Amino acid sequence: MIAVNKLSFFIEYSYSKQIERFFGQYDIQVISPEKGVRTSEIRYQIPISFDPKENMKEKIEEIMNRLLNLFPIDRIGEAICFEYSNEDYDQAPFFTLYSTGNSVSANIIDNQSEMSTPTFCEACSLKERRLESSFLLDTSKLKNRYMINVDGMFWVVSEKMAELMSEWKITGYYLEEVVHRGKVDEKLPAYQLIINNSLPPFSPNVNYYYFVSEPEERCDVCGVRGKISYPYIYSKSDIENCSDDLYVLNEWNSNGSYVYHPLILSQRFRKLLLEHRITRDVRSLYESTYGPKDWFMEPVFIDNY
């Protein structure tokens, strides 16, 4: 596995050769974009690769500080992604599910169900979202879809997906019927996916990162806001008895406003999804082939990266 931090910024085209020489000092090859017709400003998106055990913060901090001091750059953005080998995918016991499609129809907002939003952290104002009633949803949104994400933290499956999960003997969950709120003639059977158990706590070998460019997002009180987890690691002895196909993470994640527990799928479940063409084998959010119905999953590691 390789961790990649993609730095992005705008600068006048006249600095392009200087930018290329600057990154050459770090043995990073940069090919400058062409100057546009309407503006002389160009945008760089420069991927910088790291071993997962390497200190990313130290190097990124140095590069960003030097760039801001040497060149007329207003702001530098960061984006983290991870690149995996075939072996990483083949040996993973579990996968973290991030999305069931590169489309707004796969990730919807719920404005109808009764939710409570207790404060999770007074210091940074992170909140929880707790469902206080049956899920109320326009179920027509599941048309031609197997599963959708709601509010970034809840999952709803179609009748077809529910039938397949039963047929495949998927374990570790139960379903609750979603109440349709929409046009009567557009009602579709839909079910909230509820997970029975969480995985054990992470191995202490899990790595984390906080964006150098966004120090204000980091909360040292709760330790959740602003934290970017590397792929999850578990001690082999801790999960050897975890035989279900579905779990949630024991730890909290944050989307910037709310905390939630990510959904975890087994290797067996992922293989069935691929075999039955529910999704293609997409391994990066940045693949041009990542489509509106592709499920994006990242592998979980055992003992170390």
Image: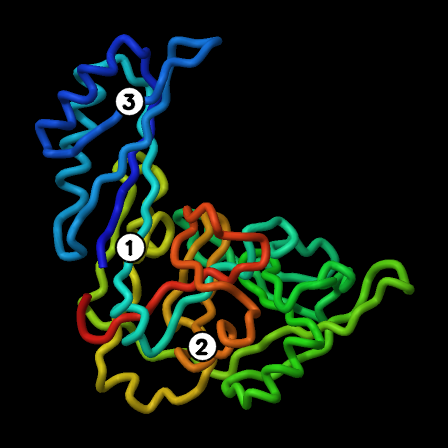
- Graded by Cα atoms within 10 Å as few (under 14), some (14 to 19) or many (20 or more), the crowding at tag 2 reads few
x and y percent of residue 251 in the render? 37, 68
Q: Is residue 38 left or right of residue 188?
A: left
- Graded by Cα atoms within 10 Å as few (under 14), some (14 to 19) or many (20 or more), the crowding at tag 3 reads some
Q: Is residue 215 left or right of residue 137?
A: left
The residue carrying mark 3 is 32
- Residue 135 versus residue 21 in the image, above or below: below
The residue carrying mark 2 is 271
Q: Amino acid at mark 2?
A: Lys
Residue at x 33% of width, y 49% of height: 81
Q: CA distance from mark 1 to mark 2?
A: 20 Å
Residue at x 52% of width, y 79% of height: 195
Q: CA distance from mark 2 to mark 3?
A: 40 Å
Q: Which mark is residue 83?
A: 1
Task: Find residue 36 and report its image quarter.
Answer: top left
- Residue 193 versus residue 100 in the image, above or below: below
Q: Secondary structure at mark 2?
A: helix
Q: Which mark is residue 270?
A: none
